[in-house]
Image: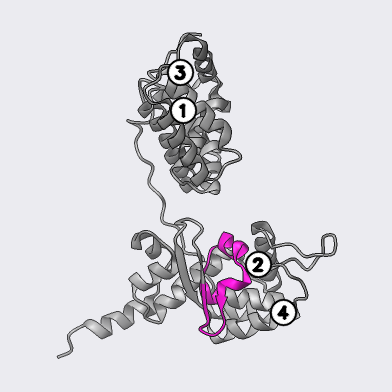
């Protein structure tokens, strides 16, 4: 089939190889492969026999995978990549159209229908993901018109910052059922780390002499350090002293698999915290993210500067950090008293 894109046959070959290898290579290896291919093929011309690769461009799933491979080359995390792919696949399933034939009207209708089924902030994320997908297709020459370019933005609705009150925090601590839960609860309250970061954390990430935890951030991929308070340090050491396994993971399953525990995965951690929330009688779902928001709010209440909190949370922007801090009339009142002029 004739190549209907603006890409050269060589570029199509390179992208098809990178796409195929993206499922087995990590980001660094994929970048190296892309560089080697471009270096070795520089100055060469790929003739007619390779133009059959361009027929794959009619396959929406193939284009999703090309997009995936290129975003992975940029260093996007797996969770982000999965959301990008899901958004594109859901659109194709809804419209039943080839990616070249999707119009602005198709997208507006799809978003209108989807707005009746999902929360507004989910809709915002969907639009962002689809905009990234079609912008990539346009920039790379797969489509001549970007159907998302003139789509109006969808504003996020400011929602209540779900965090734990001091009484709820006490209730959560009171219902721990074993040393692992006690250590996990205190660890989350003390550090405010993400669920993926807890899951990936190893025992040797912790310096018990200084009470610091140094690890690679889940989203930024940058090294970050947080601090254990005395309570978290004490109960974490107590938990680790009960461990008889050689698993490097900080938190492991109580169930044994072929005689050995496994690293606690994201879902397992969320199930544990949700179970704690139910036993504590909370009127909200106790996720690891709620612990994270509670951490941000507590630190702010204690006077932690925004820049320091941003660093502890691992946020690229202070604006993001602000969204994690629950509003407090008492905090506002203290600030007014501190800074107002008194006659």
Q: Earlier in the sequence, mark 2 or mark 4?
A: 4
Up the image or down, 95 lies above or below 305; here it is: above
Q: Under tag 1, what secondary structure?
A: helix
The image shows residue 282 at horizontal and vertical percentages of 63, 70
Residue topped by disc 4: 179
Give the number of callouts: 4
The image shows residue 341 at horizontal and vertical percentages of 17, 85
**Gap in angstroms between the C-alphas marked 3 and 4:** 58 Å
Point out which mark residue 180 bears: none
Point out which mark residue 273 bears: 2
Q: Earlier in the sequence, mark 1 or mark 2?
A: 1
Point out which mark residue 109 bears: 1
Q: Under tag 3, what secondary structure?
A: helix
Residue topped by disc 3: 101
Q: Earlier in the sequence, mark 3 or mark 2?
A: 3
Q: Which residues are magenta?
A: 189-213
Local crowd size for mark 2, using a 10 Å CA cut-off: few (<14), some (14–19), many (≥20): many
Residue 280 placement, left or right of 125: right
Q: Which residue is farthest left?
A: 343
Indicate the quadrant where residue 194 lies.
bottom right
Contact (CB < 8 A) between labels 3 and 4? no
């Amino acid at each position: 089939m004739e190549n209907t894109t603006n890409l050269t046959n060589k570029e199509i070959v390179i992208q098809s190889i990178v796409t195929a290898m993206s499922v087995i290579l990590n980001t660094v290896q994929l970048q190296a492969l892309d560089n080697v291919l471009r270096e070795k093929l520089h100055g060469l011309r790929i003739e007619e026999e390779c133009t059959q690769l361009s027929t794959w461009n009619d396959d929406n799933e193939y284009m999703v995978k090309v997009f995936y491979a290129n975003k992975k080359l940029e260093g996007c995390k797996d969770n982000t990549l999965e959301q990008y792919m899901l958004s594109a696949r859901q659109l194709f399933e809804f419209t039943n159209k080839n990616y070249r034939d999707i119009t602005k009207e198709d997208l507006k209708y799809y978003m209108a229908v989807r707005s009746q089924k999902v929360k507004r902030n989910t809709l915002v994320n969907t639009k962002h993901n689809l905009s990234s997908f079609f912008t990539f297709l346009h920039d790379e020459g797969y489509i001549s018109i970007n159907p998302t370019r003139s789509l109006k933005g969808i504003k996020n609705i400011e929602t209540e910052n779900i965090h734990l009150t001091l009484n709820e925090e006490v209730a959560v601590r009171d219902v721990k059922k074993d040393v692992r839960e006690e250590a996990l609860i205190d660890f989350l309250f003390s550090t405010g780390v993400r669920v993926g970061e807890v899951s990936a954390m190893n025992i040797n990430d912790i310096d018990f002499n200084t009470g610091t935890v140094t690890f690679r951030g889940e989203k930024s991929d940058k090294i970050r350090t947080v601090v254990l308070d005395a309570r978290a340090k004490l109960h974490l050491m107590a938990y680790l002293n009960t461990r008889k396994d050689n698993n490097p993971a900080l938190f492991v399953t109580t169930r044994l698999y072929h005689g050995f525990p496994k690293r606690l995965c994201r879902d397992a951690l969320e199930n544990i915290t949700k179970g704690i929330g139910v036993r504590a009688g909370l009127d909200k779902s106790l996720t690891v993210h709620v612990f994270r928001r509670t951490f941000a709010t507590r630190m702010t209440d204690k006077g932690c500067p925004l820049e320091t909190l941003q660093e502890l949370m691992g946020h690229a922007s202070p604006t993001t950090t602000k969204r994690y801090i629950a509003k407090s009339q008492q905090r506002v009142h203290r600030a007014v008293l501190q800074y107002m002029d008194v006659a």
